[in-house]
Amino acid sequence: MKPLFRIALALSLSVLALGASAQGKVLRVSAIPDEAPTELQRKFTPLGDYLKKETGMDVQFTPVTDYAAVVEGLATNKIDLAWLGGFTFVQARIRTNGGAVPIVQRAEDEVFTSKFIVPVDSTAKTLADLKGKTFAFGAPSSTSGSLMPRYFLMQAGIDPEKDFKTVAFSGAHDATVAFVAASRAEAGVLNASVWEKLVESKNPNAAKVRVLATTPTYYDYNWTVRPGLDPALTKKLTEAFLKLDPTDPAIKEIMSLQRASKFIATKSSNYDGIEAAAKSAGLVK
């Protein structure tokens, strides 16, 4: 082997080693795109700073264009930690043969709901009054914007594909409100948390619609780690979330942006009901 080649090879191996070492110090985080990308980034920034302090790792937030990308990122070890909806977690659990593990959820996610909305001047008084009207869900893989509302509609004797004039998918909760406000749909559904945020912020689209009905409660969002993540890091992340105290002024912004009163431990079996709903809807086998 020529001396120059040996030097180049040694340098290449050194760079690779440094890259691998650096990669081990980066916590790669993502989230389902259930709101506008700018809003997701705004919500995550202070939480990312907090996790960096708690773990000693650089925290890198990577936005994705669709729900499936988060599932694949966890399954292929490209994402270490992800904010998932209940149905997306079920998809990740199936995709990873149970390897993806939910670690925490907000207390609010034990009793989550969705809101059916109509224009303020709509004559609809019950869900049955929506038959024959155009309707907007959120993203197809959204728990609170599609799966669970569809499940509860079916329980109420309403088959969206048969009973609505047309069915559209807005792609995100805030987009659904915009759809209904702009008369692109005569009714729609979104999660209660985003609805409350839009009302509190005096969103102009939210002022043009009203809540027609609220679903029964169900489990929804959680923070999930990828298969094979170092147990010590998983423990550190779990503890970091659990000790977030909304009465601490330094933590108040994080909790407000996350719309959380507190984080609590969760487990995979909490989402078995969502998997059952998905199976009944033919969305998973």
Image: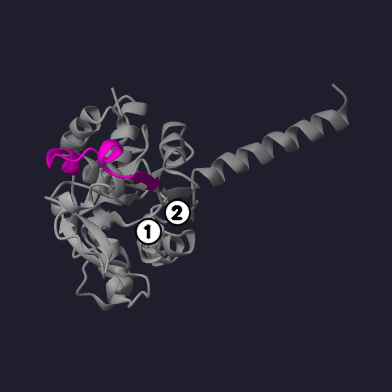
Magenta segment boundaries in residue numbering = 151-168
Number of marks in picture: 2
Q: Position of residue 258 (x, y in %)?
A: 30, 63
> Would you say residue 158 sits in the magenta stretch?
yes
**Which quadrant would the C terminus be assigned to in this image?**
top left
Alpha-carbon neighbours of circle 1 within 10 Å: few (<14), some, or many (≥20)? some
Q: Position of residue 140 (x, y in %)?
A: 37, 41
Camera-side residue of 169 and 134: 134
Per the image, label 1 sits on a secondary structure element best described as helix
Q: From the image, tell me which residue sits under label 2.
A: 57
Q: Position of residue 11 (x, y in %)?
A: 74, 38
Whether residue 37 is visible to the viewer of this picture, yes or no, is: yes
Q: Position of residue 159 (x, y in %)?
A: 23, 37
Q: From the image, tell me which residue sits under label 1.
A: 51
Camera-side residue of 239 and 176: 176
Camera-side residue of 263 and 155: 155
Q: What is the quadrant of residue 20 in the picture?
A: top right
Question: Is tag 2's residue or tag 1's residue first in the polypeptide sequence?
Answer: 1
Asked if disc 2 and disc 1 are in contact, CB closer than 8 Å, the reply is: yes
Residue occupying the point 13% across, 53% down: 111
